[in-house]
């Protein structure tokens, strides 16, 4: 693109900031509704105390308060969602109070939510008319009902039209095959993993990575029907129509997409399902706690770690996944470049890091110290999910003398989940051989 065209494009794009004062004007309008709410509430309290309020008045006054709240909700949705969509990122990733809808907001979703909010407000207004029916003319009731039905029809049409638009936004996520290269699923439930190390983890991972068997693993139970993309397909491509959650899931560099709902809870012999339900609420991320999945290979540890990571991405959190060997390569490279402190600080942008396959290869003292620095840096600051094949009491076999201090910090605020059972992959392979 020529320089004049680029400059013109940037200039036009910069005009989006002209909308910023409009959103701050809506903030002022929000303040007006706050005043109106407390004014109505004060009048209601006074009339109730003085005995001037009958049942109809109280009901109408409460409906007015609900109406004000719903309009205020509509305003905040327009202010936050509109600013995030049309002006600039607000950067709430990892904030414990981030709205659920903001994690997947776009112009299409915002329009549907606004339409449904308007229907709700119209419902309250119509209910007020019917409650005060003795003081409302039939003409007003008729047109109020017609207008309300028009709002419902408009919202239904808009929601129906948003379906094809959403499918168009997901078009790049459909039709991709499994990754062409498969690696070892050290801990996790048996899915295929690309053996290529992501660019940001450096090719030096080969020096510390565990050997990769040539056999193709058997799929885990309830395997996702979504596409499993290779590293280059899944994370380097860009789809302008994808949602914020999809962007975070791609940036997390999961080996494949797994859902907690797909996990075969009947496979492990010893598994606390209540713990999984509790972890699925993601309170551990907000409270900066850790999760450690411990168990033999093939019991589903990586599946659970990825499932929690995907759910965290959908909730608006930035997540980063890598095996222990890849983390070792990344930290080693940062230390060699003299920027280890900067690298650890940069990882603070991710409220959740996942360290997979701990224990499948021991580390030397220098690498073990790097892992200690990672755990110590995130202690009571951000969350870690760790999967491994041996309990924390045997981590000295992996990290040597650094293990006690590392385990002390990792386990202090952690949920330790033990999975017992035979490898699902081996069970499937034996069954296939018998047939």
Image (cartoon, grey):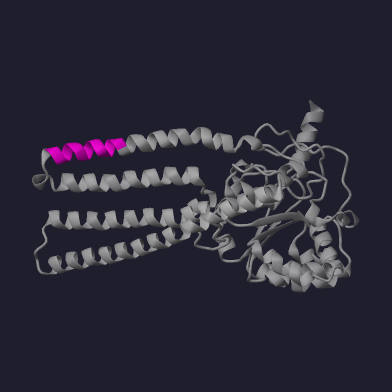
Q: Horizontal and vertical percent for residue 342?
A: 75, 70
> Is residue 213 at all visible to an observer of this figure?
yes
Q: Main secondary structure of the magenta part?
A: helix
Q: Residue at x 37, y 53 (%)?
A: 74
Is 37 contained in the magenta span? Answer: no
Look at the image and give the residue range highlighted in magenta.
Answer: 139-150
Q: Horizontal and vertical percent for residue 110?
A: 46, 47
| Quadrant location, the C terminus | top right
User: Which residue reaches farthest right?
Assistant: 207
Q: Residue at x 51, y 49 (%)?
A: 105
Looking at the image, which is closer to me, 91 or 9?
9
The quarter of the picture where residue 333 lies is bottom right
- As drawn, 363 above or below 128: below
Looking at the image, which is closer to me, 369 or 107?
107
The quarter of the picture where residue 371 lies is bottom right
Q: Residue at x 42, y 46 (%)?
A: 113
Q: Horizontal and vertical percent for residue 134?
A: 8, 45
Looking at the image, which is closer to me, 206 or 27?
27
């Amino acid at each position: 693109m020529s320089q004049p065209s680029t400059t013109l494009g940037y200039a036009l794009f910069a005009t989006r900031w002209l909308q910023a004062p409009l959103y701050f004007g809506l903030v002022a309008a929000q303040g007006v509704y706050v005043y109106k709410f407390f004014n109505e509430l004060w009048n209601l309290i006074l009339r109730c105390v003085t005995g001037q309020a009958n049942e109809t008045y109280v009901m109408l006054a409460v409906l007015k308060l609900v109406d004000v709240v719903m309009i205020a909700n509509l305003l905040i949705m327009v202010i936050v969602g509109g600013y995030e969509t049309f002006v600039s990122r607000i950067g709430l990733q990892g904030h414990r109070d981030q709205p659920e809808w903001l994690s997947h907001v776009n112009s299409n979703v915002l329009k549907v939510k606004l339409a449904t909010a308007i229907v709700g407000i119209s419902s309250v207004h119509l209910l007020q008319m019917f409650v005060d029916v003795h003081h409302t003319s039939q003409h007003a009731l008729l047109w109020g009902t017609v207008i309300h039905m028009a709002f419902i029809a408009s919202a239904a049409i808009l929601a129906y039209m948003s379906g094809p638009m959403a499918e168009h936004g997901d078009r790049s996520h459909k039709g991709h095959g499994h990754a062409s290269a498969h690696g070892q699923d050290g801990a996790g439930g048996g899915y295929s993993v690309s053996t290529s190390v992501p660019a940001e983890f450096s090719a030096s991972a080969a020096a510390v990575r565990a050997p990769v068997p040539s056999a193709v693993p058997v799929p885990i139970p309830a395997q996702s029907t979504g596409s499993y993309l290779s590293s280059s397909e899944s994370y380097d491509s860009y789809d302008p129509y994808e949602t914020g959650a999809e962007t975070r899931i791609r940036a997390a560099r999961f080996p494949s997409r797994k859902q907690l709902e797909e996990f075969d809870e009947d496979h492990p012999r010893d598994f606390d399902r209540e713990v999984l339900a509790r972890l699925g609420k993601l309170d551990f991320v907000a409270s900066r706690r850790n999760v450690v999945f411990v168990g033999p290979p093939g019991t589903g540890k990586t599946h659970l770690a990825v499932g929690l990571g995907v759910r965290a991405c959908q909730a608006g959190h930035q997540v980063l996944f890598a095996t222990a060997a890849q983390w070792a390569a990344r930290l080693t490279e940062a230390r060699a470049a003299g920027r280890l402190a900067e690298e650890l600080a940069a990882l603070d942008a991710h409220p959740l890091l996942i360290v997979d396959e701990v224990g499948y290869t021991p580390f030397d003292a220098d690498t073990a110290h790097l892992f200690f620095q990672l755990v110590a840096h995130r202690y009571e600051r951000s969350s870690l999910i760790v999967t491994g094949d041996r309990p924390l009491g045997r981590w000295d076999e992996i990290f040597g003398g650094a293990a006690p201090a590392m385990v002390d910090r990792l386990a202090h605020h952690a949920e330790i989940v033990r999975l017992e059972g035979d490898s699902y992959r081996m069970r499937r392979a034996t069954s296939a051989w018998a047939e």
